[in-house]
């Protein structure tokens, strides 16, 4: 699965006008790798509802600090560039999927 890699130059433009789940991670972070696999599975089954992107915190320290990402793995759900929900730490697939999908359903209900 080809997941866009965000950075300081493309971050705002990528988030504009859509719902995006951003995975904040680092190469050395084992829980990040485990969580990424869970995210990929969720996107494969629910890709019509969300966009997934990644941001390496080591390569994007200024942006990570600006967004107050202090622990990884962290997932932030954005709607049109605004933070809607933040999930910190490795979660089980069931809990993680419910949190993400419930947040996205709430966003979609508010739009309608």
Image (cartoon, grey):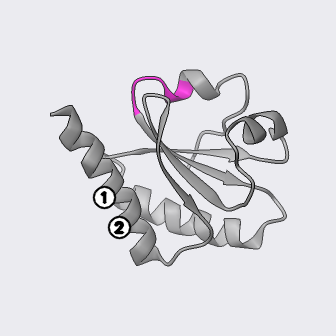
Q: Of helix, strand and loop, which one carries label 1?
A: helix
Residue at 68% over, 67% down:
33
From this viewpoint, which residue is outermost toward the left? 112
Residue at 45% over, 68% down:
96
Q: Is residue 15 magenta?
A: yes
Q: Give the CA separation, mark 1 to mark 2.
A: 6 Å
Q: Nearer the viewer, residue 78 or 23?
A: 78
Dividing the picture into quadrants, the one containing residue 91 is bottom right
User: As drawn, is 61 to the left or to the right of 68?
Assistant: right
Q: Position of residue 80 (x, y in %)?
A: 43, 28
- Is 91 above or below relative to 77? below
Q: Of helix, strand and loop, which one carries label 2?
A: helix
Q: Position of residue 18 (x, y in %)?
A: 39, 31
**Image quarter in which the C terminus is found:** top left
Magenta segment: 14-18
Residue at 51% over, 61% down:
39
Q: Are marks 1 and 2 in contact (CB under 8 Å)?
A: yes
- Is 43 above or below relative to 84? below
Find disc 1 in the rendering and name its residue: 102
Q: Which mark is residue 98?
A: 2
Marker count (numbered)? 2
Dividing the picture into quadrants, the one containing residue 98 is bottom left
- Is 52 above or below relative to 40? above
Q: Is residue 59 visible?
A: yes
Magenta-drawn stretch, dominant element (helix, strand or loop)? loop
């Amino acid at each position: 699965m080809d997941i866009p890699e965000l950075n300081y130059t493309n971050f705002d433009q990528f988030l504009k006008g859509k719902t995006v789940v951003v995975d904040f991670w680092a190469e050395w972070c084992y829980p990040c790798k485990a969580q990424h696999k869970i995210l990929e599975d969720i996107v494969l089954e629910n890709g019509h509802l969300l966009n997934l992107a990644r941001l390496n915190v080591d390569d994007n320290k200024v942006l990570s600090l600006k967004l107050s990402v202090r622990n990884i793995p962290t997932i932030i759900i954005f709607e049109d560039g605004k933070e809607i929900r933040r999930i910190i730490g490795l979660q089980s697939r069931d809990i993680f999927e419910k949190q993400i999908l419930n947040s996205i359903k709430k966003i979609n209900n508010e739009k309608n």
